[in-house]
Amino acid sequence: MSALAPYLEGYAAYPKTRPWLQALKQQALQRAEARGFPQARDEAWKYTSLATLEQRGFRPASSTVTLDAGALAPLLVPGLDCPRAVFVNGRYAAGLSHLPKGVRVVAARDADESLAALLAVPPDWEDDTFLNLNTALFQEALLVDVSGELTEPLEFLHVSAPETAAASHHSRCTVKLGANAHAMLIERYTGLDGAKNLTNSVVQIELGSGAKLTHLRLQEETFQGFHLGRVLVSQAADSCYVSHNLQHGAAWARLDLAVALKAAGASAELNGLYATGGRRHLDNHTRVDHLAPHTASRELYRGILDGQGRAVFNGKVVVAPHAAKTDASQANHNLLLSRGAEIDTKPELEIYADDVKCSHGATIGQLDEQQLFYLRSRGLDAETARSLLIGAFAERLLTLLPLPALAAHARRRLGAAVSRINLPEPA
């Protein structure tokens, strides 16, 4: 049986929507079917096997799973009280959500043709099987259109709930910030005990001139769950995109984050922290395209790996031929806590312009024995000394988080992801 068979059967079982969207979905499905699942010979998937996804045969989630406020409460971040859109297995839960002006959820059956450009697969991604599957199978799209300033953070909370069989859900979100608009977006993926689903999400972001978006993305699915994410960012002149990506959940996960700096003055800051243990696998692929002169990007990713955990970091910066005065830097640092842990890191630079300033680098290391000795000589036991050093390594990224409640939550979740981490709450 083809790996795509469960998805094709799920598509056939869905009720038909409006003709223009049905045609768009049909085209996406045909592209996914023609492309198939990526193989190991595809450079972008060289270190991340899809065999488990193929074997599981995830079928599109049913529409019968619901959640009440009592079940949702333990999944909320203590102290984080803000407008929120809640999705359960990819379906919008209106009764659990509170949306501000400019944010709406559109069901596929109600979408009008003015949304065609927003919901179509971008030309550069037409070969991407999972983005095509998302387009073919999403049932509801979250649309965010901000002009001016969104005064409170906005949280998109995606909950994965157990189903009777392995299920997939396909969430879709479009974020548009007008000229000089400002907003903070929290995108969080979590799950209930027993959830073994595949999340396949797509978020498209468009920033107008002078706009600024702070985007916090937390992937904290259950350790039996699977996660695929796509974040595609397009920036106009003088816009600013700041990403904080925390990835520490799921048995198997991959995120593709692509940023296009399309006009002078655009800038991007990408911060990432991932942690894995057991036999879990996490993959982060980032790409920044400098497509205009006088653009800037900063990228810092750190990883903590324990047990037989595996991780992949592939960061690519591309400077177009006419993008003079580009200023770009990229760094990936990794801490291995066991002999069985493994990281494949690949920072890449492609520069086609003169008069640019670009740098990149990667490190892989273990805890410093001299630092451990020093801490123990001051009376600390071995476990506390190790925890302090691991915490200091992670803290560089956690202190960048702009919301204290979310930073405290991240510390607790990292401790659950890697048992040797015991990060203290901030004073």
Image: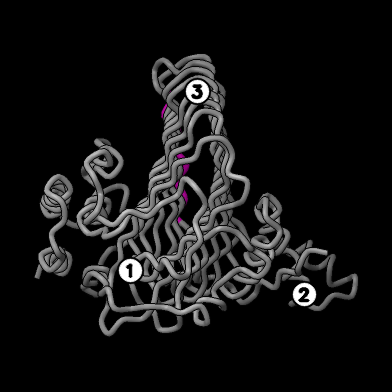
The amino acid beneath tag 1 is Leu
State the extent of the magenta-drawn residues as a range.
344-351
Q: Nearer the viewer, residue 100 or 27?
A: 100
Q: Decide if residue 40 is in sight here.
A: no
Q: Position of residue 152 (x, y in %)?
A: 62, 50
Secondary structure found at label 3: loop
Q: Which residue is denoted by mark 1 in the rendering?
A: 198
Q: Secondary structure at mark 1?
A: strand
Q: Which residue is located at x 44 percent, y 46 percent?
A: 144
- Which residue does the numbered mark 3 point to in the structure image? 237
Q: Earlier in the sequence, mark 2 or mark 1?
A: 1
x then y, percent, for residue 62: 25, 75
Q: Position of residue 35 (x, y in %)?
A: 15, 50
Looking at the image, residue 312 lies above or below residue 69 = above
For this rendering, which residue is in front, 37 or 369? 37
Quadrant of the rendered image containing residue 5: bottom left
Residue under pointer 2: 384
Instruction: Write the residue at 47% across / 34% down.
Output: 207
Mark 2 Cα within 10 Å, few/some/many (few <14, many 20+)?
Answer: some
Is residue 164 in the magenta section? no
Look at the image and tell me whether residue 344 can be seen. Answer: yes
Q: Using the image as rendered, state which of residue 255 and residue 22 is in the foreground.
A: 22
